Amino acid sequence: MNVLSDLLFWAVFAGGLFALRQQRIFWPLLALALLLLFNNLFTPYFFNLEIRNGYLYGSRIDILNQGAKVMLVSLGMTLVIATGGVDLSVGAVMALAGAVAARLMVVDGHGFTTAFFGAIFVALLCGAWNGALVAYLGIQPIIATLILMVAGRGIAQLVSDGQIINFADPTMVFLGNGHLLGLPFTLTIVLALLAATWMLTRRTALGLFIEAVGDNPTASRYSGVNARLVTFLAYLFTGLCSGLAGLVAASNIKSADANHAGLYLELDAILAVVVGGTALTGGRFYLVGSLVGALLIQTLTTTMYARNVSADIAPMPKALVIIAVCLLQSEKARRYLSRFTRRPATPPALPSPAVAPSVIASPAQP
C-alpha cells in the first residue's frame, strides 16, 4: 500500500508542479517537494501511512494536523500584511482564546457552545483593538500589535489563574483531535475558512480594496475606498483566525496553557505569508500561497523532530531553507544566479579574408 500511495502522491505532486510552473506559487511548492523528497529518501518511515479504525495516520497526516494552527493564522496574517501592516499579537490571542474557552467549560460549568463563541468573541475584541489602534489612531502596526502581544498573554494568565486548565468535553476534544472522512478535522476547518476567505476577497470588491490600501492608502482614499474600515476589518479577521487557532491548539493537548500556547507562532505565520508570495510592503496577496508556506514550515519542523535535531539549533536550518525559497522567488536573484549557470556564449567566427584573384598579364596580341 505504501509503495502505491507514494507513487500516486508523487504523480499528483509532479503534475501539479508542471501545471503551475509559470505561477508564483511554483517556488514554494518546489521547495516543499524537495523537502518531502529528502524525507522520503533519508528519513525512515516518514512516508508510511496506516489505516487504524478507518482513519489515516502517518507523518504526512501529522503535518496537516499540526500545521493547521499556522495555516489558520496565516490566512488572517495574509490580509493584514496585504494592507501594509503586521500583527505580532496572534500568539497571545491564541493563548487568550484557549484560556477563555477552558475557564468557561471547567470553572464556570458552561457547555461547548458557550465556550466556543465566548472565546471567538474575545478574539474578535482583540482584533478590533488592534484594528482601532492602527486604522483610527494611526499607531504603527508593529507597535500597536506589540502592546497586545505583551499584555494578551498576561491577561490569559489572569483568566486561567496562572494554571493549566484541563478539560474533557468531547466536542472540544474533537475540534483538534477528531476526524472527518478519514482525515483530521482540523483540515476541514482550514479548508472551510480558506473557501470563505477566498469568496470574500475574490468574489467581492473587498480583495481589490485590500490590495489598493496596501499599494497606496492615500490614492485609494482619494478613489473613494474607506481605507480605515478596510484596515480595521483585516485586523478583525485576523483576530477571528487566531481565536480558531487557539481553540485548535487547546484541543490538541486537551488543556489551556496560557504560557506556551501560540508561543512564537506569529513568526511562523509571517514567514508562511512571505514564502507564499505576499510582499511585506503590502499589495497583492496569495491565500493559497500562504497555506503552502505554512505547510513548508510545518514540514521543516517535523523534519527537525524526525532527524533528532536539537531544539537549540533547529531554527538555523529552518532559516536557511526560508532564505533559499525567498531567493528563488526573487527575479533579480534568479537573474544573478543565472550568470554562474549559463554557459558562456561562443564568439562568432571571424570571416576569412577574401583572397584577391591573381592578375595574369596576357601577352599583347599582334
Image (cartoon, rainbow, N blue to C red):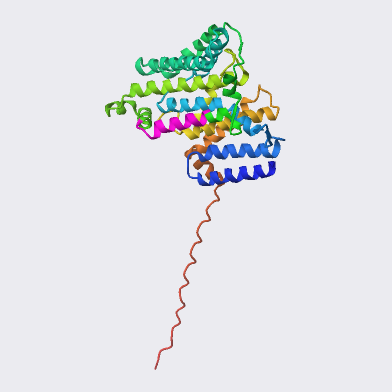
Relative vertical location of residue 76 with respect to residue 157 in this rendering, above or below: below
Q: Nearer the viewer, residue 13 or 51?
A: 51
Quarter of the view holding residue 133: top left
Q: Which residues are magenta?
A: 189-205
x and y percentages locating residue 110 in the rendered image: 53, 11
Relative vertical location of residue 213 with respect to residue 18 in this rendering, above or below: above
The N terminus lies in quadrant: top right
Give the residue at x 54% y 19%: 247
Give the residue at x 49% y 42%: 335
Relative to 132, is 109 on the left or the right? right
x and y percentages locating residue 188 in the rendered image: 54, 30
Relative to 37, is 188 on the left or the right? left
The C terminus lies in quadrant: bottom left
Q: Count of labels shown?
A: 0
x and y percentages locating residue 72 in the rendered image: 51, 26
Relative vertical location of residue 298 with respect to residue 26 in this rendering, above or below: above
Give the residue at x 34% y 28%: 216
Q: Is residue 143 visible?
A: no
Q: Nearer the viewer, residue 62 or 339?
A: 62
Q: Is residue 248 visible?
A: yes
The question of residue 24 being in magenta is answered with: no
Residue with the most extreme right position = 44
Give the residue at x 62% y 19%: 253
x and y percentages locating residue 228 in the rendered image: 34, 21
Residue with the most extreme bottom position = 366
Q: Nearer the viewer, residue 2 or 35?
A: 2
Quarter of the view holding residue 103: top right
The question of residue 193 being in magenta is answered with: yes
**Magenta stretch: helix, strand or loop mostly:** helix
